[in-house]
């Protein structure tokens, strides 16, 4: 049984990526720096608020408020989150259809943190041959120091990653102080140490295993590809020609000599394989493990530059281009994704820009539905819920429409001031007066009008509610 298991499941082969310089490596480094500056520094960015922590980005779950700079998002605005997720999904489909897995290669969290961990490993243990030699060697003082130093820095980065994530939910300076003094809430410790462990394992130990076996995107990405999608590809016709790829040797050192011999431009140096963070050989064609980081392009271009040969043996191109056909980027699918994406962005932007400063809901108190007074008039009671969505006080005026004989009684609270982000419930009584004969006007609905005062430019909120009366209207 153990022999069958050994045949079915191959033991993981350790990958030792080699460093490389080039335009795509520079692009990845720039994306990495930008992502880390945003992620690690945003919780420390201050934003003046009179009634909430002065933190620019803060997800206050106990208070049920999300603060994003000057924008305050409340629970009833959760559809904005749904809109943002829809936009990201459509953007992913749109970009993948055009340029493959560029998200994975440059912006995915797994890629960014794995990249940083590999930089630390290279800094502590040396280049690819030195790391391979260190792993094969015995556990001596050098190996303990280098491996221990690598894991120590990994743990430090992983811990700060977990703590920073927690800072987005609690005021950052307060959290750090409470965390050190042991006063932080239990969920803060749990979240921080959980993310520390997962970051250490996934970015430091598992690495390419996450992309290959855990990420579902690797499995369904091909459904979004077509013959015009720009992907990292090896030009087999140029690289191998009739006689295949061959190393540089006597009579095969120039392109002219190799072309006469029917040999391609690929000198089989293996540099493109050595720099690959997932350990694949791009010369074997497109593989689901490929994350389109394009480091193999930098590696191949470096070799071509040294040989004074044209670049592009490995490049971003389409299957149609490799087969001598034209690449069409503007297709019905691409245009459709683009139109849907722009429409979703415009709708979400319009919704945010036209958001109201306050919300109001009105419910009829149904026990009893109505009361008939001694003078024949009918009274209904309502509960008005007002919510100030701003971080500044507002003043509201409440009135009614729908009947000339209707009278609103709120015990002097027809004009009410709400503190920043205050929610209140106020009772309202609406009475339809009787005429001289003692018969009340037959009214079926009443419209409450809530107006924002003090230089407001927004339209008043109108809420039409039923008005209950005796069935015969008397």
Image (spheres, rainbow, N blue to C red):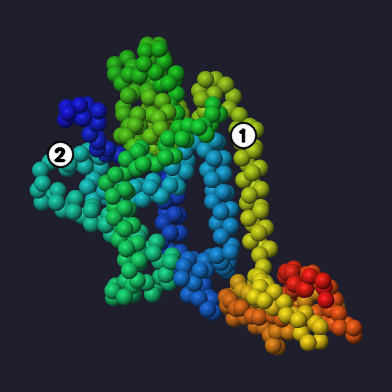
Quarter of the image for the C terminus: give it. Answer: bottom right
Q: Looking at the image, which residue is at 32% across and 34% down?
A: 279
Q: Position of residue 123 (x, y in %)?
A: 26, 50
Q: Which mark is residue 333?
A: 1
The answer to whether residue 354 of the structure is visible from this angle is: yes
Residue under pointer 2: 136
Q: Is residue 352 left or right of residue 148?
A: right
- In front: 93, or 113? 93
The residue drawn where x is 66% and y is 53% is: 347
Residue at the image point whose x is 54% and y is 45% from the top: 89
Indicate the position of residue 47 as horizontal and vertical percent values: 52, 72
- Tell me the residue at 69%/74% (across/down): 369
Residue closer to the observer: 455 or 261: 455
**Residue located farthest toward the front when viewing the structure as drawn:** 472
- What is the x, y in percent for residue 165? 39, 61
Upstream in sequence: badge 2 or badge 1:
2
Using the numbered discs, state the Cα–Cα distance from disc 2 to disc 1 in whole angstroms: 51 Å
Q: Residues within 10 Å of mark 2 (few under 14, many from 20)?
A: few
User: Quick check: 238 above or below 448?
Assistant: above
């Amino acid at each position: 049984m153990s022999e069958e298991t050994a045949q079915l499941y191959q033991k993981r082969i350790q990958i030792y990526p080699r460093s490389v310089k080039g335009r795509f490596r520079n692009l990845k480094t720039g994306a990495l720096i930008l992502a880390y500056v945003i992620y690690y520094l945003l919780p420390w960015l201050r934003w003046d608020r009179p009634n909430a922590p002065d933190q620019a980005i803060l997800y206050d779950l106990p208070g049920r408020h999300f603060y994003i700079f000057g924008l305050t998002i409340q629970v009833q605005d959760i559809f904005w989150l749904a809109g943002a997720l829809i936009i990201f999904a459509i953007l992913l489909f749109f970009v993948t259809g055009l340029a493959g897995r560029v998200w994975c290669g440059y912006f995915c969290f797994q890629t960014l943190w794995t990249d940083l961990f590999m930089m630390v490993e290279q800094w502590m243990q040396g280049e690819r041959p030195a790391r391979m030699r260190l792993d094969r060697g015995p556990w001596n003082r050098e190996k303990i120091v280098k491996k221990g130093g690598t894991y120590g820095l990994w743990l430090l980065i992983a811990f700060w990653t977990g703590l920073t994530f927690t800072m987005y939910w609690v005021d950052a300076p307060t959290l750090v102080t409470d965390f050190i003094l042991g006063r932080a809430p239990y969920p803060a410790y749990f979240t921080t140490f959980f993310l520390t462990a997962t970051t250490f394992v996934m970015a430091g130990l598992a690495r390419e295993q996450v992309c290959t076996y855990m990420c579902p995107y690797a499995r369904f990405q091909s459904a979004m590809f077509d013959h015009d999608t720009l992907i990292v590809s090896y030009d087999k016709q140029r690289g191998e020609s009739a006689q295949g790829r061959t190393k540089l040797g006597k009579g095969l050192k120039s392109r002219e000599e190799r072309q006469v011999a029917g040999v391609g431009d690929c000198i089989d140096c293996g540099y493109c394989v050595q720099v690959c963070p997932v350990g694949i050989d791009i010369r074997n064609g497109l593989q689901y493990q490929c994350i389109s980081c394009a480091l193999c392009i930098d590696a191949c271009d470096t070799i071509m530059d040294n040989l004074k040969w044209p670049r592009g043996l490995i490049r971003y191109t389409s299957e149609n281009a490799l087969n001598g056909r034209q690449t069409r980027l503007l297709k019905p699918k691409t245009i459709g994704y683009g139109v849907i994406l722009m429409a979703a962005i415009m709708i979400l932007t319009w919704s945010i820009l036209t958001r109201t400063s306050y919300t109001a809901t009105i419910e009829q108190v149904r026990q009893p539905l109505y009361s008939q007074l001694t003078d024949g008039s009918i009274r209904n009671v309502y509960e008005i819920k007002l919510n100030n969505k701003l971080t500044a006080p507002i003043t509201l005026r409440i009135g009614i429409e729908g009947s000339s004989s209707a009278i609103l009684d709120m015990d002097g609270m027809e004009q009410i001031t709400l503190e920043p982000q205050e929610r209140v419930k106020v009772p309202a009584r609406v009475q339809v007066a009787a005429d001289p004969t003692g018969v009340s006007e037959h009214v079926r609905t009443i419209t409450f009008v809530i107006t924002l005062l003090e230089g407001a430019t927004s339209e008043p909120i109108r809420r039409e509610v039923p008005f209950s009366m005796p069935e015969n209207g008397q």
